[in-house]
Image (cartoon, rainbow, N blue to C red):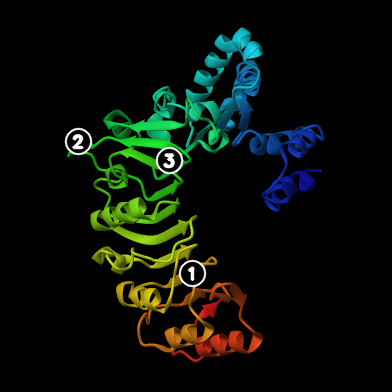
């Protein structure tokens, strides 16, 4: 029996997408299954409603041994029935506060109603110095016209999270206050998805950072985000830039006025951008140290022949991995025939250092 018990964590580790209901069922098998399955079940609970927050809080109070198992939590409650919520509003508020004051939280997501004035809820956190990852997600309320998702990132928040490594902002209005000159950010990964910057700049979030491992921007407003990316690149070295454009365009101004900071890039992903042979040559001349280049979306107007020429050129000698759209928007978008695909693969294989292409 002990041999079987020793296999339990291996069985659970063999699959990383267990459904909570499956883990709950496994806790009923035996005491050993309860021990291991419960650790997974409570590691990062997802709370989709205010009543769910109340129930989890009740469980933690009735069984205090569960609280240390929680290392991350996703709080995404929506308003639901207003009349029902009015009757239980006090209990719900207490539950949310209790969950935000758990010790040992390293990852936190605030979504739903908690993305409205999210900075207020961030200041309820009792152990902010332990948090390494924060995600403010307003996507559940993106159609709302009033009481919209918003965040004011001020000096108090800037200094509150000394161990924060990953910050992700999704579908919210953001005000970023200029931090004190002594502030030095610990953020190494910044993801900004369809965010409206009302005041300040993204570079204020990472003031003092010498290097950013990852900068991921998703937007429909290239004019604003081009400038924001330039400011970030001017303030620190960026290892990997993912730039996703969700609006069609016939011009790509970013690589016309791009800063010197592009030379630090080791990874560049362009999705949904207008890319022609001229833009591609601009990438080659400005991003000389790129190891991985991925160009995707239906705005790419580079022919298979031009890709072959790009691969064979002397620029970007550091390139090792290349992701292609496997078609050209002439327009319309047409996929390449087998012969042209083979020509690209042959060109990649013929380099002194062969390219991995997908």
Disc 3 versus disc 1: nearer the observer? 1
Which numbered mark, 3 or 2, is in the foreground of this view? 2
Q: Nearer the viewer, residue 343 or 188?
A: 343
Q: Is residue 227 visible?
A: yes
Q: How would you rate the neighbour count of disc 1 (Cα within 10 Å): few for under 14, some for 14-19, many for 20 or more?
A: some
Q: Mark 1 = which residue?
A: 294
Give the number of the mark in front: 1 or 2. Answer: 1
Relative image position of residue 276 (x, y in whole percent):
43, 75
Please state which of residues 34 and 252 is positioned toward the viewer in this rendering. 252
Please report the residue visible at 65 percent of the width from the left and 39 percent of the height from the top.
40
Where does residue 322 sit, x and y in percent of width and height? 50, 75
**Quarter residue 241 falls in:** bottom left
Give the label on residue 180, or none.
2
Name the element at disc 3. Answer: loop
Image quarter of residue 162? top left
Query: Which of the marked residues, 3 or 1, is nearer the chain's N terminus?
Result: 3
Disc 3 from disc 2: Cα separation? 21 Å
In the picture, which quadrant includes the N terminus? top right
In which quadrant will I find the C terminus?
bottom right
340 shown above or below 280: below
- What distance separates the C-alpha of mark 3 from that of mark 1? 28 Å
The residue drawn where x is 50% and y is 87% is: 305
Residue at image coords 54%, 67%? 298
Q: How far is the residue under mark 1 from the one under mark 2?
A: 37 Å
Viewer-proximal residue, 163 or 152? 152
Q: Tell me which numbered mark, 1 or 2, is placed earlier along the sequence.
A: 2
Q: Is residue 163 visible?
A: no
- Residue with the mark numbered 3: 132
> Does the residue at mark 1 contact the one at mark 2 (Cβ under 8 Å)?
no
Residue at position x 74%, y 38% in the image: 23
């Amino acid at each position: 029996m002990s041999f079987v018990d020793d296999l339990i964590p291996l069985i659970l580790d063999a699959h990383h997408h267990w459904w909570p209901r499956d883990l709950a069922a496994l806790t009923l098998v035996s005491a050993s299954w309860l021990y291991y399955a419960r650790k997974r079940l409570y590691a990062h609970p997802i709370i989709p409603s205010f009543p769910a927050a109340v129930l989890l809080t009740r469980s933690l109070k009735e069984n205090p041994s569960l609280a240390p198992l929680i290392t991350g939590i996703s709080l995404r409650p929506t308003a639901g029935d207003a009349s029902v919520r009015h009757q239980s509003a006090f209990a719900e508020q207490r539950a949310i506060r209790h969950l935000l004051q758990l010790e040992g939280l390293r990852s936190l997501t605030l979504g739903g109603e908690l993305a409205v004035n999210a900075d207020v809820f961030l200041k309820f956190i009792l152990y902010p110095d332990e948090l390494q990852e924060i995600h403010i997600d307003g996507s559940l309320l993106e159609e709302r016209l009033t009481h919209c998702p918003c965040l004011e990132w001020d000096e108090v928040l800037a200094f509150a999270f000394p161990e924060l490594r990953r910050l992700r902002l999704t579908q919210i209005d953001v005000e970023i206050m200029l931090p004190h000159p002594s502030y030095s950010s610990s953020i190494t990964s910044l993801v900004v998805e369809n965010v409206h910057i009302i005041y300040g700049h993204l570079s204020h979030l990472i003031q003092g950072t010498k290097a950013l491992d990852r900068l991921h921007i998703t937007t429909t407003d290239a004019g604003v985000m081009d400038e924001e990316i330039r400011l970030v690149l001017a303030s620190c070295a960026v290892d990997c830039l993912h730039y996703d454009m969700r609006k069609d365009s016939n011009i790509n101004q970013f690589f016309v006025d791009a800063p010197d900071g592009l030379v630090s890039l080791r990874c560049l992903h362009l999705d949904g951008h207008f890319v022609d042979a001229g833009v591609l040559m601009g990438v080659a001349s400005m991003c000389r140290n790129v190891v991985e280049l991925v160009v995707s979306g239906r705005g790419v107007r580079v022919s298979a022949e031009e890709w072959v020429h790009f691969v064979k050129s002397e620029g970007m000698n550091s390139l090792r991995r290349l992701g292609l759209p496997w078609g050209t928007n002439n327009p319309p978008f047409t996929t390449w025939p087998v012969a042209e695909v083979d020509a690209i693969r042959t060109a990649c294989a013929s380099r002194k250092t062969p390219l991995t292409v997908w």
